Amino acid sequence: MSTEIRERLNSLASKLEQQRGSIETEEATKNAFVMPFISLVLGYDVFNPNEVIPEFTADVGTKKGEKVDYAIVKDGEVQILIECKHVGAPLNIKHASQLFRYFAVTTARIALLTNGDEYQFFTDLDAPNKMDEKPFLVVKVSDFDSALLPEINKLAKDAFDLDSIINAAEELKYVGEFKRVLSSQFADPDTDWVKFLTARVYEGSFTQKVREQFTGLVQKAMKQFLNDRVNDRLKAALGNQPLQLDDASVSSPEASAHVAEASAEAASDAREGIETTLEEIEGYQIVRAIVCSEVAPSRIFQRDNKSYFGILLDDNNRKPIARLWFNTSQKYLGVFDAEKNETRQPIESLDEIYRFADDLRRTVQGYEGGK
């Protein structure tokens, strides 16, 4: 099921990229992105009012007739409340007043705030029947963290397990917060962080001069630490060629988190029983060698799945370069056109990948703006 959810999220990510520029209203956001998420990812029938109630109304105090966008029903009770905003709009908990009020008067234990790309899941960890102000789970379709697949699966209709969701929510909430704090510190360490680390290697007083000196050293050490950790995981897959991270690779919280998420995804894949073969690695190296004429080799990533081996630009599932379909007797190389439509080309040997060098380079050029 997790593999199916991953594929459906990839499909939604492609749809987001293609259509978000033409979505101008909250209603269009719901139709284009939120309803497909409820249907394809969570598995509920959006046209069955016994499962999904649009414009759900419950009188709350003096707020008569106020609505939330959707209520998801399972086993005859409201389980999830959903409030939607326009795609691209920042999600601010202050704008979710209906969710707060409805959470207290319905049977729902899960609330969802979304703009069609980012999905923030809330529960009542801090006080019973009162929605928390911070989400326990954040899913971003356009930059999906595969380590979250098991948690999303728990929210899906066929596997919905409220007790399991609530039990995992506290850990998810604080792990997510820790990741965001660490990401920001790796990108721009504050004085307390620098002082904390400096105290473990330097015995003198933490003066202004020392702070300025060690801020640069801390940044350099963290960059090298990330580089070492990624190399430990990827050396074998890259044929013992070390991966170099430039300054831009760790210049933002998102980039720092991305490296950690890539490692987590590799571990998650291993747990799911995905086995990367030597032939897939050799095919990856051939594709990498072909397209390095267009972009730096360090921007070419591999992501193995049970059904195919994916090769991506910038480790972004919206930028597929090729897919290696090597799990059957007939091997195929999946190549992509300008609209990201995949064509599977039958090949008998790895050397035949070179026949499609121009197609692979054109795909990468398209992502680079035709350069």
Image: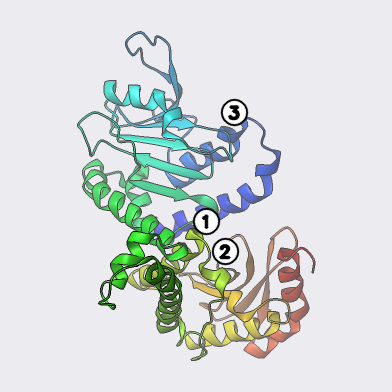
Indicate the secondary structure of the residue bearing disc 1: helix
Percent of width and height locating residue 67: 44, 19
**Amino acid at the residue labelled 1:** Asp
* Crowding at mark 2 (Cα within 10 Å: few <14, some 14-19, many 20+): some
The quadrant where residue 53 appears? top left
Q: Which residue is mark 2?
A: 316
How far separated are the C-alphas under marks 1 and 3?
23 Å
The quadrant where residue 211 appears? bottom left
Vertical placement of residue 120 versus 327, above or below: above
Q: Which residue is mark 3?
A: 27
Vertical placement of residue 67 versus 250, above or below: above
**Amino acid at the residue labelled 3:** Glu
Q: Residue at x 66, y 82 (%)?
A: 347
Q: Is residue 349 visible?
A: no
Q: Residue at x 23, y 47 (%)?
A: 164
Indicate the secondary structure of the residue bearing disc 3: helix
How far separated are the C-alphas under marks 1 and 2?
7 Å
Query: Residue 196 vs residue 4: left or right?
Result: left
Percent of width and height locating residue 198: 31, 72
How many labels were placed on the picture?
Answer: 3
Vertical placement of residue 107 versus 346, above or below: above
| Dot 1 and dot 2 residues touching (CB under 8 Å) | yes
Q: Residue at x 48, y 84 (%)?
A: 237
Query: Looking at the figure, which quarter contains the C terminus?
Result: bottom right
Q: What label does residue 143 carry, if any?
A: 1
Q: Earlier in the sequence, mark 1 or mark 3?
A: 3
Q: Earlier in the sequence, mark 1 or mark 2?
A: 1
Query: Residue 31 vs residue 204: left or right?
Result: right
Q: What label does residue 259 carry, if any?
A: none
